[in-house]
Image: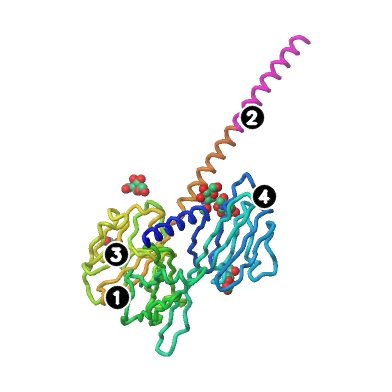
């Protein structure tokens, strides 16, 4: 009986999922988001569209009605309606989280769940500790109970329990707390990762606002197809490159990929065939692509505190070269045009000369 009942409930939920048309978005505070109303273009009038925002703690608010953004509400200045009736919200805040419902006379209503993730940091206390709070906001707290927010350091290690540099204080409902030692000689990055339904839904990188004083950060700019040598400037308790480790992450992205482990290129890493470790522990990447842009971090023994970052930027391929090609083409066209004009002028002259000669011979 209970089995039948749960089957029925499951079926009902599935049907609801299909008919209700819901979408879940996981965004970062400060981002701009577009919530699609999914109006087909044949109806192309947004004048009958309304958008409503709802959060369990707040009463429903009408944000857009009759195709117009309602003025006066908090945050109305950040809202606009695009031509296809999508709602654009600029610079989202935690208060923007919740469920958005788009209504349109000819269309089934569409619900968009907007979930936000953000990191706040306390100012350093007397012993230089900073508390990082990673906060999730959504329609209700059920989202938080179903989600895990954990922290990684820039070496890609999940931070659990306590270490010399950190103290993971756990996740309390919608907030995950990490205390870190804030020292200017350590250019640390920490990432908060939101995990739900066995997937990473969002991640944010926290970078201390001070700039790196020790010169351990390097910025390189290269073009697609170049080879690049990334030097490892981490301080080491070892002098052997068989201890060197390299990881890679896209700048804004918190996922860290291991590329070199104890001096050896990880054969499963992306582009492994183009990677090698050179004699002085530098990472050599051959024939770089756009996807190689990002931050590379190296360190020696895992017990060493010191690590160093190299930021690799990929320059747009040869805008100067394009200019030369375009310039060359323009010169060619101009030359052809001048040639044509010269030819015409010649023909004209020959003709007029002939006519003149004829006239002369007639006259004479
Ligand atoms: C948008 O509408 C089409 C039908 O018009 C539907 O098939 C599709 O699933 C909808 N998309 C979303 C995100 O609801
Ligand atoms: C609606 O327009 C916005 C930009 O104005 C665009 O980003 C979005 O993809 C469009 N959505 C649909 C469903 O066409
Ligand atoms: C975004 O909003 C925050 C406050 O929530 C504000 O401090 C910041 O200046 C805004 N950024 C932009 C680009 O408007
Ligand atoms: C590391 O070795 C490469 C040759 O393998 C050399 O080109 C590069 O200058 C060296 N870098 C440093 C920092 O010594
Ligand atoms: C460099 O990579 C591109 C693809 O990204 C490939 O077409 C080209 O053959 C490679 N060049 C060399 C010298 O390996």
Depth order, front residue of 85/53: 53
Residue stretch rendered in magenta on the structure: 337-364
Indicate which label's residue lies in the foreground, 4 or 2: 4
Q: Residue furthest bottom?
A: 126
Q: Secondary structure at mark 1?
A: loop
Q: Which residue is mark 3?
A: 282
At a point 39% along the width and 57% down the height, the residue shown is: 7
At a point 30% along the width and 78% down the height, the residue shown is: 305
Whether residues under marks 1 and 4 lie with C-beta atoms below 8 angstroms apart, the answer is no
Q: CA distance from mark 1 to mark 4?
A: 63 Å
Whether residues under marks 4 and 3 lie with C-beta atoms below 8 angstroms apart, the answer is no
Q: Quadrant of ligand 3?
A: bottom right
Is residue 206 positioned above or below 113 on the image?
below
Using the image, tell me which numbered label, if any, was put on residue 45. 4
Depth order, front residue of 322/285: 285
Q: CA distance from mark 3 to mark 2?
A: 61 Å
At a point 29% along the width and 75% down the height, the residue shown is: 235
For residue 364, which quarter of the picture?
Answer: top right
Looking at mark 3, is its residue's CB closer than 8 Å to ligand 4? yes
> Which x, y percent locates residue 307?
32, 73
Indicate which label's residue lies in the foreground, 3 or 2: 3
Q: Which residue is mark 2?
A: 341
């Amino acid at each position: 009986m209970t089995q039948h009942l749960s089957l029925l409930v499951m079926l009902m939920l599935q049907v609801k999922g299909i008919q209700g048309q819901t979408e879940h978005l996981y965004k970062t505070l400060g981002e701009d988001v577009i919530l699609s109303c999914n109006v087909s273009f044949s109806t192309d009038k947004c004048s009958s569209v309304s958008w409503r925002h709802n959060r369990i703690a707040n009463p429903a608010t009408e944000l857009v009605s009759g195709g117009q953004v309602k003025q006066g509400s908090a945050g109305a200045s950040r809202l606009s309606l695009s031509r296809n009736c999508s709602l654009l919200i600029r610079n989202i805040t935690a208060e923007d989280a919740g469920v958005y419902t788009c209504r349109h006379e000819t269309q089934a209503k569409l619900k968009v769940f907007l979930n936000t993730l953000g990191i706040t940091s306390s100012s350093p206390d007397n012993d230089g500790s900073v508390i990082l709070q990673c906060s999730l906001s959504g329609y209700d707290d059920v989202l938080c109970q179903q989600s895990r927010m954990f922290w990684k350091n820039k070496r890609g290690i999940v931070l659990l329990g306590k270490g010399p540099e950190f103290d993971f204080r756990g996740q309390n409902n919608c907030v995950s707390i990490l205390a870190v030692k804030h020292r200017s000689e350590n250019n640390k990055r920490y990432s908060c990762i939101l995990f739900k339904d066995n997937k990473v839904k969002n991640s944010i990188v926290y970078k201390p606002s001070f700039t790196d004083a020790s010169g351990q950060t390097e910025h390189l700019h290269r073009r697609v197809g170049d080879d690049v040598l990334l030097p490892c400037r981490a301080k080491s308790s070892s002098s052997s490159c068989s201890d060197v480790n390299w990881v890679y992450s896209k700048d804004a992205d918190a996922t860290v990929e291991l590329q070199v482990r104890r001096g050896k290129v990880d054969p499963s890493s992306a582009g492994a065939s183009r990677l090698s470790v050179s004699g002085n522990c530098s990472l050599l990447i051959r024939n770089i692509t756009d996807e190689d842009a990002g931050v590379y971090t190296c360190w020696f023994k895992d017990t060493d505190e010191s690590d160093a970052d190299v930021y690799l930027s990929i320059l747009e391929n040869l805008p100067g070269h394009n200019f030369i090609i375009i310039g060359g083409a323009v010169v060619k066209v101009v030359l052809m045009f001048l040639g044509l004009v010269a030819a015409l002028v010649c023909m004209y002259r020959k003709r007029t000369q002939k006519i003149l000669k004829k006239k002369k011979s007639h006259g004479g």
